[in-house]
Image (cartoon, rainbow, N blue to C red):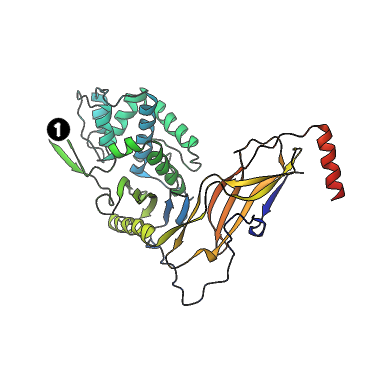
């Protein structure tokens, strides 16, 4: 019968790094430095993309209105179309009188005028640098011909990324009666996708401090780029309904962090907390490699296979961020899978998860793969296996 099976750390093979859960560290050991996020910012999240570890979380699945942070999905959707060859960066779009009448000087603006023909690349800069509501709508119409078709693309992309608490009702986050909403966890997924899937386009269009269109020069309101070492985006948001929000990212020494703060009561508090949180994420932790890639750390039971079990190995190094002053003695590991697993199994198939816990709290989870193939047993082998189980 299929059941959820958890092999505790004591079942891990000797080839794995030997780690043991320990009692609380003695009083002489330094306590972790708390995340510098004021309590009056209700939503926060900080994730290290180098290993997927959550460094700080506060109501990360709570839904909220993202305001202009919505434009990150508009940029991502455009990047995807460019990458697929369906949209050219040098293609021009004739901005219409209808769009000017609807969007000129409506909130954050690129200040497009009817008859102008910006390129897709210029519209992207207007979206990512000066948060143009007009540029976002122009992108939608230029790429798909209508807002509805563009919103379908945005929502389809959100679903593909696993953004389960997100829906987009506009391309720019302009107040729409609550049809647009998201969560910090979902925005972190979006931040990961846009930085990791399209790094060249991300580098090209995010992180600019100013933009000039005709004779109008505007500044980027991103509070971290140029102020936090390694920071390069992404997007602020504000409406009276949503409060002050920021999706940001920075990279140092191969570690890229993505952060979200939402619902801050004022912009200054959001900006200061954003800078402090990114710096804390880099400075308050040290990263350790616990298990190298390709190490067999345990085994999973097999049903109807030529073998009754299969080795489980790491597909990539198991790295974890530890608070400065703490070591691996606080970590426990467990293997979790749903089994016995039905044969046949291909070598390299993801069939289990390795969980790393610090003081009983889940810090990191990563896939484990089958170390070798296990073919399905023939009728004679299944009978022999049944006898062995009966005699055991």
Residue 126 drawn at (x, y percent): 25, 36
Q: Nearer the viewer, residue 12 or 183?
A: 12
Q: Which quadrant of the figure has residue 96?
A: top left
Residue 365 to residue 94: above or below: below
Residue 135 drawn at (x, y percent): 27, 33
Q: Residue at x 21, y 24 (%)?
A: 117
Q: Residue at x 54, y 65 (%)?
A: 330
Residue at the extreme bottom: 27
Residue 68 drawn at (x, y percent): 33, 42
Q: Which quadrant of the figure has residue 270?
A: bottom left
Q: Using the rendered image of the protein, determine whether residue 67 is visible from the camera's viewpoint.
A: yes
SS class of the residue under badge 1? loop
Which residue is denoted by mark 1 in the rendering? Answer: 214
Q: Nearer the viewer, residue 255 or 148?
A: 255
Q: Residues within 10 Å of mark 1 (few under 14, many from 20)?
A: few
Residue 183 drawn at (x, y percent): 45, 47
């Amino acid at each position: 019968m299929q059941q959820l099976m958890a092999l505790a750390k004591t079942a891990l093979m000797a080839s794995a790094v030997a780690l043991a859960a320990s009692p609380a560290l003695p009083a002489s050991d330094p306590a972790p430095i708390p995340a510098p996020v004021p309590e009056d910012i209700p939503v926060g999240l900080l994730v290290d993309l180098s290993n997927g570890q959550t460094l700080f979380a506060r109501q990360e699945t709570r839904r909220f209105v993202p305001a202009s942070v919505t434009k990150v999905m508009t940029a991502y959707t455009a990047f995807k179309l460019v990458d697929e060859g369906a949209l050219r960066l040098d293609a021009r779009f004739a901005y219409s009188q209808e769009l000017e009448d609807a969007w000129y000087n409506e909130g954050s603006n690129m200040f497009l005028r009817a008859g102008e023909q910006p390129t897709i690349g210029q519209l992207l800069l207007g979206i990512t640098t000066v948060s143009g509501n007009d540029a976002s709508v122009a992108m939608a119409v230029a790429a798909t011909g209508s807002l509805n078709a563009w919103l379908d693309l945005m929502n389809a992309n959100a679903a593909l990324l696993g953004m389960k608490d997100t829906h987009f009702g506009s391309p720019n986050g302009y107040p729409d009666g609550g049809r647009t909403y998201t969560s910090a966890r979902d925005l972190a997924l979006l931040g990961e996708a846009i930085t990791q899937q399209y790094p060249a386009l991300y580098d090209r269009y995010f992180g600019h401090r100013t933009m000039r269109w005709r004779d109008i020069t505007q500044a980027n309101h991103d509070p971290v780029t140029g102020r936090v070492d390694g920071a390069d985006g992404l997007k602020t948001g504000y409406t009276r309904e949503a409060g002050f929000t920021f999706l940001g990212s920075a990279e140092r020494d191969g570690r890229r962090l993505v952060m979200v703060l939402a619902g801050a009561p004022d912009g200054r508090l959001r900006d200061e907390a954003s800078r402090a949180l990114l710096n804390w994420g880099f400075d308050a932790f040290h990263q350790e490699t616990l298990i190298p890639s390709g190490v067999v750390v345990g085994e999973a039971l097999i049903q109807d296979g030529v073998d009754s079990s299969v080795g489980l190995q790491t597909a990539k190094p198991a790295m974890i961020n530890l608070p400065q002053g703490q070591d691996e003695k606080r970590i426990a590991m467990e293997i979790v899978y749903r089994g016995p697993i039905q044969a046949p199994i291909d070598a390299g198939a993801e069939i289990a998860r390795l969980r790393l816990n610090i003081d009983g709290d889940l810090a990191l989870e990563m896939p484990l793969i089958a170390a070798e193939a296990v073919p399905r047993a023939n009728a004679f082998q299944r009978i022999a296996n049944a006898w062995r189980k009966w005699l055991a």
